[in-house]
Structure formats: C-alpha cells, structure tokens
Amino acid sequence: MSSRGLYEKILLDHAKNPRNFKVPEVFDVKLEGFNPLCGDQFTFYLVFDGDSIEQVYFHGNGCAVSKASASILTTLLEGKSKREALNIIESFIKIMKTSPNEKIDEDKLGKMAVLVGVREFPVRIKCATLPWHTVEKIIQGETHSVVSTE
Amino acid sequence: MIEPLYIKSREGLSTGPNIGKSRTAVEYLARKIGLETLRSNFPILGISVRGKPLVYLDNAATTQKPQMLIDAVNRYYSRENANVHRGIHYLSEKLTDRYEEVRTKVRGFIGAKVDCEIVFTKGTTEGINLIASSFALPRLKQGDEILVTYMEHHSNLIPWQIVAQKSGAKLRVLPITDDGLLDLSYIDEFLSDRTKIFAFTYVSNVLGTINPVRDLTKRAHEVGAVVIIDGAQAIAHLPVNVQEIDCDFFVASGHKMYGPTGIGILYGKAPILSEMEPYQTGGSMILNVKLDNTIYAHIPHKFEAGTPNIEGVIGLGSAIDFLNSVGMYNISAYEEALVSYAYQRLLEVPGINIVGPFEPRTGVLSFTMDCAHPHDISQILDEEGIAIRAGHHCAQPLMERLGLPATARASFAIYNSVEEVDLLIKALHKVRKIFG
Ligand SMILES: Cc1ncc(COP(=O)(O)O)c(C=O)c1O
C-alpha cells in the first residue's frame, strides 16, 4: 500500500477539517496525550451526562493520522455510555494490533475503517492509537497525568 | 582514491569562477570534488527503497559508510582480530599499534597537541557524561553556575541538569534570537565569574547554525570558565582545530563522520584530563593493582576501562582517511554551496517555513509546511525514496522556544547532489498536492 493509500480522502478530510476541534468553555475532565517520538500533542475534553458521554472535544497539534483519528473518535463516542465507549476503544486498539494481512470486515467498522490502512505503516500506528489511549484513560478515571505512547 | 581539490580556504573559493548559489555553481564544485567517484565509494547510495533510488538526507542522524571502512572492518575480523594492550603476541602487538595509530590520526584531524589528549568513547553522549561525572561533579558547588544554550541536544543538557541537582550549582541557558542564532547580547549577563562551565554546541542539529566557537571560548576563559564543545554536527562538515578554538573539551561521534556507531572522540587538554578521576574502572586503565589500592594508568588509558570498541576504532581510522582524502575545506565549501542552493529552492515552495538562519550554517535544514505536519511530510517523502527526519530532534527546549511541536529536517553530507535537492523539492510539491 502506498502513502496515498494511507492518506485516504476521508482521513484527509478529518485531518483538514477535524470535528469537535476546540477547547470547550465547559467540560468535566481533560487529559493530554503526547507522542514523544513525533511531538503529537492533543488534549481531550469530555462532557459527561451521568453515565454517558455527551461530547468529546480535542485540541492541540499533531500529524494528519493522529488528528484524523482523534476527530473520528470524538464523533464515535458522542452519546455512548462509558461501557459502550470503552468497548469501542478496546476493539479499535485490538484491530490496530493485528497484522495488516489480517482481513477485517470493513463494513462492520463504520467510521473506523479509514484508519485500518495505518496498520501497513508500523511507525504510524502510535499516531492513530494515541487519541484512543488518552480517552480510554479519561473514562477509566485517570485525569492527573499525561498519557504517553512511549 | 579521490582527487584532492586544491582549494585552501573558503575565501579563496568564493572568489573563484562561477561560484554562487546557482545550480551550475554547485555542479561546478561537484565536479571539482569528483562527486560521482565519491558517491560510488558508498555502496548504500546505490540501493533502491520503495522502488526508487535512495536519496539519503538524514545525515545529521547518522552518515553512511564508505567502502574503505567496510573493507577495513572486514579485514580486521578476517585477519587481524586480537585484544589490544594485552597480549605479547604478533596479532595483539600489530593491532595495538593500529589502534594507537588511529589515536594519532584523530589528534591530527582535530588539531590536538598530543595523542594522550584523545580518549575513545562510545560517542558524544558518553563523552559529555564522562566530563560531567569526572570533571564537573567533583568540582562544582553551590553558588557556581553551568551555562548551556537553548540549542543544545538533550545529551548536552541532561547531564548538566544532573550535575546541577547533585552539586547545588545553578544551570543557566543562553537565549537564542528568532533567527536561530545565539543571542550574544545576553552573554555578559549569563557569563560571569560564577560560571564554572560553559557547554555549547558547535553546530545546532536542528537549526544548522554554526556558533562562533572561538569567540565564545575566549569570553568564557576571560571569566575563568571551562569550555566544553559538542562537536557532533561539526566534525564531518567543518575543518575543526581544537587548539585554534582553545576549548578545554571537545566531543564527537564516529557515526556522524562516516564512521561506525559505538565509537566517539573525547578531546581534553592534557593537564585537565590528568587531574580528573576515572569515569569507569576495571581492566586496561590501571598501572598497578593491590587488593586495597590501585594506581591508575596515565591518560588517555585512564579513561578507557575494559576491552575497547576495537572495530569502532579501526573504522573511525578509515572514516578519517576518507575525510582527509576529500579535504575538510573542500567538504565545507561544497556543502555550503549545496545547502545554500537547497535553502533557495525550499523558499520557492509555497507554504514552507525554514527554521534556522541562511548563514552561517551547515547542511542541517529544518522546515515546516503550512499544509502538512512534519511526520506526514516525511511519510510522503519516504514513498519517493527520500529519507529525512521528522520530530523534535532530541532538542525539546529548543522546539518549545521556537513554538514548534516538530520540524521536518533534511540534512546533507558530502555525497549529496543537486539532483537530490531537486528530487526533494519535487516531492515537497507532491506533499502540497496531497495536503494543500
Ligand atoms: C548536536 C548533537 N549532540 C549530541 C548528539 C548525540 O550523539 P550520539 O547519539 O552519537 O551520542 C547528537 C546526535 O544526535 C547531536 O546532533
């Protein structure tokens, strides 16, 4: 797969026009994710409504892969219960750990599908998973430190 | 092997015919240094990656190795291997002589006074740590100051943080200007009789900036500070003479000067080295050992405990032979022309921001693009067979000062050509097409 395959149209769209990309006026918790290898640095802001996630926002700096991944993540978690959100995150991280040769039913993945191609580029997997690890930590209640991919 | 170029100084070169920053000028110099032959001495430059000929522009990370080095290391393992400074037998004696000949070669190459001022280390990082532990730590105390600069590699920052923490000395950081030069208007404020150590880089591994090392050394000596120069990015690109600079210590890495990894050079003035405690202890660094007391060997062996990296030393010798065969003045003249051409061409790419001054600089060229993150730039370039680096380049405080999370960095070496610069530019236009 060439890089042009990595930078699919949908991924580029999310990178250029990231959804929920702002520092919200009010939020319940925030956590910073940092990839020391390339300097990707995003802060995620969560607004909860009881046990469910009302909104996820993010802001910061990073490559197209990490930014698009974060953007997609925020759209996926809107309105989900914490349990559902953790399941989505877990399944995504699990997929990213599989070999690129492993066939995956892309229809079932929905919005996550555009990120599956990243598996072909081992050094970029961390870019894609950083947002997910960070938000996972927030939901699990870890809010006091920086999440690092190293 | 490579025909020497009879250019004696940079001044002489710039008054020569057809010299400028044009493509023709660089090509003229390329012919003078015999670039084609020179390139053919580096087998790796002939390989293809991702179906494209390799364009290797990550020379600030590490340089490629000439065939003569590969042959020398091969010969060493096939026919010459033994331990050094130990056996009374043919192989060991021969190899010990060769090992010590490389020390002499290094001394000549950096213009040190005597061989015993040259210590073999693992690299720049180990050299600085050695100075920090064996020289600085036992001497510094509360009230003293250590001065570094904003453009240091982490390896010339963290050892000093630790010395400061342990000794109670204060670590101070000389600012830089927005252009990426040391801000010398602050020098009197930061350099005082409290300053015991001034450690700075000769060339920035992010900005490419060449610092005025002679001047800085003089200023530091006026207040009685000891000067440590990180020469990692200078040694393969500029003629270095430690006696002219008059620095007290100078460190560099073999692998950034066409030599092997795991070998480095530490230069220290003999009287200072002699007074220092050993860094590591054990075999090879002793004169006489009793169960309760040991007399250490003289310098430099006092600092070379254990069986050394012999392969590395042999390879380093070949690397210096290679550098000498081209000539450091020729190397710096050619690279200077090549990078000024590259700088110019980069500026022509819309949305590019070059991080670092136009001059005085070496071939380390950092940049960002409005449309793409450095990591994405690097990915697209990789697809074209072009190797550059993206990230913070082990200089996080500098990146923070510049307000950049990361840069893309193309770094040139003597074997790079104008054609390769053109390929870089072409690929950057592709990046714009994809992300713009
Ligand atoms: C300016 C500078 N100093 C120090 C180092 C560390 O060198 P090494 O990793 O070979 O010890 C580097 C290499 O990245 C460098 O560029």
Image: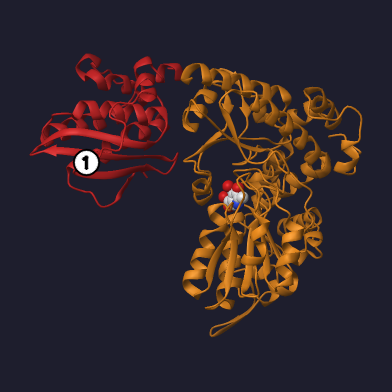
Q: Is residue B146 above or below residue B68?
A: below
Q: Label 1 neighbourhood size at 10 Å, few (<14), some (14-19), many (20+)?
A: few
Q: Quadrant of residue A124?
A: top left
Q: Residue at x 62, y 32 (%)?
A: B57
| Beta carbon of the mark 1 residue lies under 8 A of ligand 1 | no
Residue B160 x %, y %:
54, 64
The amino acid pointed to by label 1 is: Val
Figure colour of chain A: red
Between A8 and B320, the one nearer to me in the picture? A8
Q: Residue at x 41, y 16 (%)?
A: A5
The residue beneath circle 1 is A26
Residue B81 x %, y %:
67, 51
Which colouring convention does the figure follow?
A: by chain
Residue B43 x %, y %:
68, 30
Q: Quadrant of residue B291?
A: bottom right
Looking at the figure, which quarter contains the N terminus of chain B?
top right
Among the chains pictured, the one given orange colouring is: B
Q: Is residue B227 left or right of residue B323?
A: left
- Evaluate whether residue B65 shows in this view: yes
Between A51 and A86, the one nearer to me in the picture? A51
Between B117 and B210, the one nearer to me in the picture? B210
Residue B187 x %, y %:
66, 62
Q: Residue furthest bottom?
A: B292
Between B46 and B155, the one nearer to me in the picture? B155
Q: Is residue B388 left or right of residue A150?
A: right
